[in-house]
Amino acid sequence: MGIPESQLETWSHQGSITQSSETYGIIKRTLENDKAPYNGKNYKIFLQGSYGNDTNIYTESDVDVIIQLDDVYYSDTSDLSPEDKEAYDLAFIPATYSYDEYKKDVRNVLEDKFGKDVSVGSKALTIAANGNRRKADVIAAMQYRRYSSFKNSHTTNFEEGICFFNDENKIIANYPKQHSSNLTLKHQDTNKWLKPMIRIIKNLRSKLVSDGLLKPGIAPSYFLEGLLYNIPSAKFGSSYGDCFVNAINWIQQEADKSKLVCANEQYYLLWNNSPTSWEKADAEAFLTAATKLWNDW
């Protein structure tokens, strides 16, 4: 029978914008405090995640904020030739401001403003919701560079991302700006069907979880965005129902799942034991549950 178009239309709507915008504004102004220890260094503050990408739904409107320090960066030099790696090593200058110091400074600035509403998670500094302020996650990140060439300090090629360390002191590198830019380009290429379909898939995921048909945490929004990013643009259009059927059929019947990529196009989407990729079994569990919900509606 399939999920009615009217239900899909409801699920396609964007969640809170005003409260999320106000929350981001408060956090951004707090981080820009001229008394912060990192004040005077080169940094930038920006959004990532569902609200930043206009894919937030009513039940998932947390605000994800990045404060990226550019005066210190970490590098991936694995693609450099031996000659370029030697040039990189000669030009390398060790940083004097450690990541731990930086994250502690960001935490102190947030605690001065939000007090006990701030807690430390495995990756982010979380600010609890309070009144009209929404829950927010702040990641203290440093610039990350994946080099493809290095001749000297002024002649280089690299892909810029962000990196941070989790509570196990493992570095995690990601590319939120590429993710956002690629989603927007794909949204335009699908005649603006992509982002409403992402919101539909997220709401469908939420229903599966609330109905006990899918374990919480199995299908993070970031990976759902990546999943739909891989769908050929020609599969979108006509109706939300057709989009859903076309997308699931393409993934399950036509796609080479080993070649699906994250929306940032820097990592494979389905890859086991990687903090930046979706566990294959989890992806299959979501696809199976989503298909069953559609067929049994």
Image: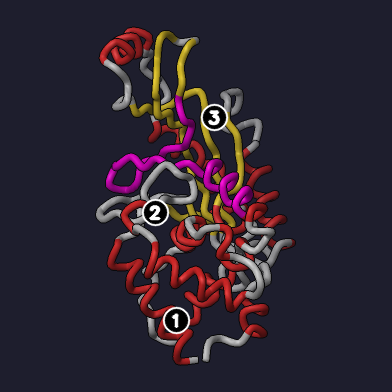
Amino acid carrying label 3: it is: Pro
Amino acid carrying label 2: it is: Leu
Q: Secondary structure at mark 2?
A: loop
Q: Residue at x 49, y 36 (%)?
A: 105
Q: Residue at x 38, y 73 (%)?
A: 286
Magenta region: 158-186
State the image coordinates of residue 259 (x, y, percent, origin top left).
Answer: 35, 51
Residue 164 is drawn in which quadrant? top left
Mark nearer the N terminus (3 vs 2): 3
Depicted 57 relative to depicted 293: above or below: above
Q: Are marks 3 and 2 in contact (CB under 8 Å)?
A: no
Estimate how packed mark 3 is, as few (under 14), some (14 to 19) or many (20 or more) residues with alpha carbons within 10 Å.
some
Label 1, label 2: how far apart the Cα atoms are: 24 Å
Label 3, label 2: how far apart the Cα atoms are: 42 Å
Q: Secondary structure at mark 1?
A: helix
State the image coordinates of residue 292 (x, y, percent, origin top left).
Answer: 41, 85
- Residue receiving disc 1: 208
State the image coordinates of residue 187 (x, y, percent, origin top left).
Answer: 63, 55
The numbered dot on residue 37 is: 3
State the image coordinates of residue 211 (x, y, percent, origin top left).
Answer: 44, 87
Residue 183 belongs to magenta span: yes
